[in-house]
Image (spheres, grey):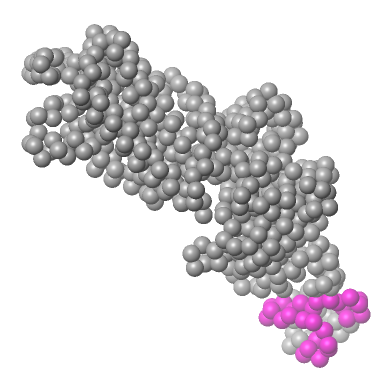
Amino acid sequence: MDNSQPLITATNLKKSFGDFIAVREISFTVEKGVCFGLLGPNGAGKTSTIKMIYGASPVTAGDLSVFGLDIKTKARAIKSRIGVCQQENTLDPDLNVLQNFEIFASYFNIDKKTAQARTMELLHFFALEQRRNFRVAELSGGMVRRLIIARALINQPELLILDEPTIGLDPQSRHQVWDKLEALKEQGLTILLTTHYMDEASRLCDELVIMDNGTILAQGSPQSLISKYTGHHIIEVTEPGTDLIKYIQGKDVWQENLGHRLIIYAAGEHDLYRDICSRFENKDCVLRSASLEDVFLILTGRELRE
Amino acid sequence: MKIDISLRFFRVWQRNLAVYRTSWKINFLPPFLEPLFYLIAFGVGFSGLIGNIRYETTQVSYVSFIAPALVAINIMNNSFFESTYGSFVRMYYQKTFEAMMATPLNAEEIITGEIVWGATKSVIGTAIMMVVISFFGLVSYPVALLILPVAFLGGIAFGAVGMCFTAVVKTIDLFNLPVFLFVTPMFLFGGTFFPLSGLPVWAQQVALALPLTHLVNVVRALNYGIFNQDVLIGICYLIVFSLLTIPYALFKMQRRLIK
């Protein structure tokens, strides 16, 4: 394939399970060398989408090509060129770390010598050489996660797919995983990840889509989404008084009243903030940078998902 | 969905062999001790009460009557339990199949690898048991060596039928149903510990519909160094049984693994 062609092209991609439609005719492309994020609340259709991309779930309707190959007819060829890090711990508990890598490599028909060399390289890169003879049950959550990512690289994939790569990890482990993923990005690896951690998406993703109920709500770089949907600054007032609420309502500003909190979006000028501070002496009034989380909540709403 | 099986299924087999090898000393114990215990219990303790049993035109001792049945039961148990409890644990609890599905392996190859592995365990168990039984002078070589390929065929048949159950059970406890309604009756009434002729005619007919009865017939005849009609019928039965259960297991497991 030539370099200008996107790595993944999804056109009107649909996935349904009986009557339930998980993915509703979405279209997107992932260019080579980018880190592309799929964001969305639980049940948004993120995992269903990536499962179709790595060939574990058949496409209900629409077209999906990876490396310029049709997933419906060339799934095996595509699967041999991608690395997948699933949400759950899929390391083999019956085997030690080294065996996990070597046997996983054999599924790709990689010969034993090459597999051993790559295993040591990957364990070194993820700082896990000391654990090579450990059993999976003896490892911490952070180590397991790094091992799953490392194992997904055993076939030197052109595309790395990660489903919630840092779910359930402590902050130290999350940062370590992010460091490694950033290093892989530097090396030019294309990464597709799903997450509902906005800090993770802001840090890693060059481009992302926000999904909900199986559709794409917005698409762009983290910064472009922020400028488009919330503006760069936000004023947040905790426990606003009625006079303050009335005053703000009189102004022509974009606001959201959550009862105990009042949020004013696109507060580009500092004047309004100073104005509020001087008039109302409210100590719990802050001016802050807008984040992807604000965009996410605006687009997907604040209701709980069960 | 179509069935597409390449030789890559062998990788799944190798994975299971690697796990088996890490604890081979423990894995070798059951096929070694089980016949020993049974033969001592029945040979020393029980056979005095029973005397000889008629097999075709000759008389055989009770111990040499049950020894080949123990081999056949071992063939059934090894592959059936491997493709039920063993495969279910790998599929449901360990997510081993899920990891495999993200590689060039497909569902059909995973399941084929599992069934062939179960049959391999049957062969390993059979080989160990035959060594033990040989010490009691109960095996006629070289014809009895044909029991090894028969163990593979029987292992495929019982592994495939076990996999059919694995494809449909919701929880691991439900395996109690096929174990108590299918495996245990065959174990007791499949011409194993007493000749089929000891059963009423209707029960003999039921027994002849079940795979263990045929496997016992084949193994027993070969163990005595005899080729008879039972061998031919039994092998045909096991082949047909496998040809029915393998596609069903593959199809149902595809449905279960691919959503």
Which residue lies at the image location 62% right of the left edge and 29% below the top edge? A102
User: Residue A143's quadrant in the figure?
Assistant: top right
Image coordinates of residue B183 in percent, x first then y, are: 26, 37
Relative side of B177 to A9, left or right: left
Whether residue A270 is in magenta: the answer is yes
Answer yes or no: is residue A297 visible.
no
Out of B222 and A294, give the one closest to the viewer: B222
Q: Quadrant of the C terminus of chain A?
A: bottom right
Image coordinates of residue A275 in percent, x first then y, are: 89, 82
Which residue lies at the image location 63% right of the left edge and 62% below the top edge? A62
Image coordinates of residue A60 in percent, x first then y, are: 57, 61
Relative side of B94 to A264, left or right: left
Q: From what the image shows, is residue A105 above or below residue B108?
A: above
Out of A273 and A191, give the one closest to the viewer: A191
What segment is highlighted magenta in the picture?
A246-273
Relative side of A265 to A55, left or right: right
Out of A135 and A217, give the one closest to the viewer: A217
